[in-house]
Amino acid sequence: MSSRKLSLGVKIFIAMILGIVVGIIAYQLGWASYTTTYLKPVGTIYINLLKFIVVPVVLFSIVTGVVALKDLRRVGSIGGKTFVYYICTTAIAIIIGLFFANVFKNLGWFPKLETTDLVYEAKSSDLSKVIVNIFPSNILSPLVNADMLPLIVIALFLGAGILSAGEAGQRVGSLISDMNDVTMKILMMIIGFSPIGVFALMVDVVAVNGAAIVGSLALVLLVAYIAYIVHVVVVYGLSVKFLSKMSPVAFVKGMSSAMITAFTTTSSSATLPLTIECSNNLGALPEVSSFVLPLGATINMDGTAIYMGVTSIFIASCYGVDLTLAQMATIVLTATIASIGTAGVSGAGMIMLAMVLESVNLPVAGIALIAGVDKIFDMGRTTLNITGDATCAMWISRLEKEKMAKKE
Ligand code: ASP
């Protein structure tokens, strides 16, 4: 079993490298329109398959996760720890992002631009609306629209209902657990297509964007990637080593297929199936990962948080604005909330950035400056987003295993 898993990870990696090489060749030959016409649809089919399975995965796995925890107090205690972990790592992520962006800015490496010709108009998001919309007024619409936060609320209520409804609850619970098993099988079939999907997506991104997309924005991308790497090495490294008591290298190795899938699909939700699979293979308890990971794929976005910190400073610098410490504290707060409200889909973080910019009165139109390279930011931030979720699943699993060992 494990050698099959390993070979899938290796296959995905090879597919990614091949995709980059073919993409560079296609870019040099000016074949971007061909890759978009003929290869991108293959990648889109792969993403569609992942997306269609994600609603049943989130619904059934959270309900199964809640039911497997057996009593509501345990749900509360794991849920509470998970939430605190997610919020803390996200806030640290923004601070790391702000720190490196300020270093680059103070070195004079960020431009001050003529920005009058901006045409981009971002949708702005209203904080109270984000919170109210978490609570669905209709049971079907979150399922139909793959609206993850309300879907999680439905799953939590369903799980809590099952746990409190005695025998009837048990019957419904076992039906949902069967549905979960079936969903997981479908999932495995879809995961089998990963190498093909990853190859197709990678070729197209490179062929279309080439080196030019990086161009003048190379520096802000560099800052974001430095911050991403520091966060992985320091925060996740320490978390895995000291909280989960496992080797960070083994952790990254075990997570690699999920990380590569996140990097290429730029969607935490689409990657969720692989995040669950890899975490379980690394020793996470299935009842923990099926609760902690879907929750994380929706609310825990460390990469997105870093991106928000870095790009706020960059945009401020472009407009010649010097942010005060208080304004940066505001960014930490709003970016934490904005990242919770960010859907785990491609490009969502850029939309939510509007909320952060508005909180410190920066022009939302500044998003236009970085919109062209958002995909490249997104690749890194999604990779972090899912890795952070997995570190939490490993930690909570260790705590739960210790608790169980004590009871025996
Ligand atoms: N693409 C990211 C994700 O799915 C969200 C974002 O755009 O920041 O995790």
Image: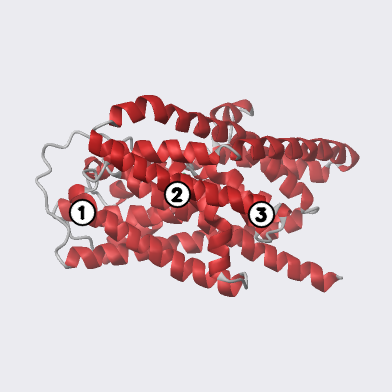
Mark closer to the chain start, 1 or 3: 3
Residue 122, visible in the rendered structure: yes
Label 1: element kind: helix
The answer to whether the residues at label 3 and label 2 have Cβ atoms under 8 Å apart is: no
Mark closer to the chain start, 3 or 2: 3
Residue drawn at x 44%, y 27% is: 41
Give the image location of residue 6, x and y in percent. 61, 54
Give the image location of residue 42, x and y in percent. 47, 29
Q: Which residue is mark 1?
A: 316
Q: Which residue is mark 2?
A: 382
Q: Which residue is mark 3?
A: 3
Please give left or right for residue 78 compared with residue 13 in the image: right
Residue closer to the observer: 247 or 405: 247
Label 2: element kind: helix
**Amino acid type shown at disc 3:** Ser
Please give left or right for residue 366 compared with residue 190 in the image: left
